[in-house]
Amino acid sequence: MSPIEHIQKKGSYIVTGKADTASMKGMKKMTVLEVKNLQKSFGSIRAVQDISFSVEAGEVFTIIGPNGAGKTTTLEMIEGLVTPDKGEIRFGEMKWDNNRTAIKMKIGVQPQSSAMFDLLTPEENLDLFATFYDKARPTEEILKLINLTEHRKNQVSKLSGGQRQRLAIGLAMISDPDIIFLDEPTTGLDPQARRNIWDIILELKKLGKTTILTTHYMEEAEKLSDRVCIVDQGCVVILDTPSALIEQLTKEREVRLSFLDGVEAATEADVFSKNLESVSRTERDGAALKLWTDKPEDTLHDLFKFTKERNFQVEQVSIREMSLEDVFIAFTGKDWRD
Ligand code: ATP
């Protein structure tokens, strides 16, 4: 029995050992959600124009896009809160039209913070939400999962933004759903509070849960997701694993150098680099030089040979990794703003 099966059988949320991710990787893919050609307009605003994707069991699937891209509307249609104008939503064989109750048992939706009871404690909120379901996970386990055991008896109104968001995730988990929807759970939080939420999402993954997440933060999508769906203006721009998306970009890398010998050295290195076949373009700013090359190793080898011959001292060298932000810019032609 794998550690995950063991935990599920025991009915415990708390991961005591390392999840057997190797055996998860070997597992056959199973589609738990399929969305086809979703459309939704509000008056003249076409919030969702054409969105299709499918989500596999156990993955963290992230929908990312700028403000107004249609992420929340898409999620709300999938959650059964908004009726699509067109399109299809299936949870396996189940559809909202005829399997409402069964789907509700299968999914967990992070409530808006206004849905929490501010004058109650996290423990009381969880206990109360538990009464909405036929079966619920023990509050104790949820408090541990969301790291709020210490604050279990504090009034919700006294919690920080990050703690409230963690409680919201706990409330989505109370019915032990297979699929959890988190709509921008980290927006407005400081970096540490965001990381605490990331830890919970990774913990959910270890438990074999499927998480569907929306975010504004590229870094978050890159770190957490098995697959990322970039949406813009109500349409899917591109969908793949973060590494495959980055791989699809040109193999070109940005190399940065700075010289102890100042502007003169950088200028000469610039002229030299421009003549290298592997270098497509350069940019110089004072003693710093940036260049773009599809063969960083060869380029640096040639450059270091040159600087050694000229007795120039290189102060710093770095090769910038491509990020999802570069993918967004490449596929939409727009700058990314959080
Ligand atoms: P954000 O990241 O800012 O939350 P989003 O990607 O989630 O944006 P949506 O909230 O789905 O985008 O909104 C998509 C578009 O639809 C926006 O132009 C928004 O103003 C509009 N919209 C969403 N809900 C409604 C509504 N109930 N009535 C009218 N317009 C709406």
Image (cartoon, rainbow, N blue to C red):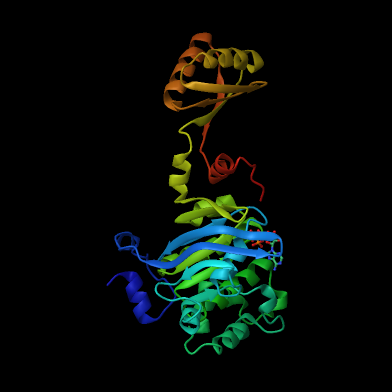
Count of numbered badges drawn on the protein: 0
Among the 4 quarters of the image, the one containing residue 13:
bottom left
Q: Is residue 184 visible?
A: no
Counting from the top left corner in percent of width and height, residue 58 is at 41, 65
Q: Is residue 338 left or right of residue 254?
A: right
Counting from the top left corner in percent of width and height, residue 119 is at 72, 83
Counting from the top left corner in percent of width and height, residue 133 is at 52, 87
Among the 4 quarters of the image, the one containing residue 14:
bottom left
* Between 33 and 36, the one nearer to me in the picture: 36
- Say which residue appears at 48% left-offset and 38% top-offset: 249
> Is 296 located above or below residue 313 in the figure?
below
* Between 299 and 80, the one nearer to me in the picture: 80
Q: Quadrant of ligand 1?
A: bottom right
- Say which residue appears at 43% left-offset and 46% top-offset: 244
- Say which residue appears at 69% left-offset and 80% top-offset: 155
Quarter holding the N terminus?
bottom left
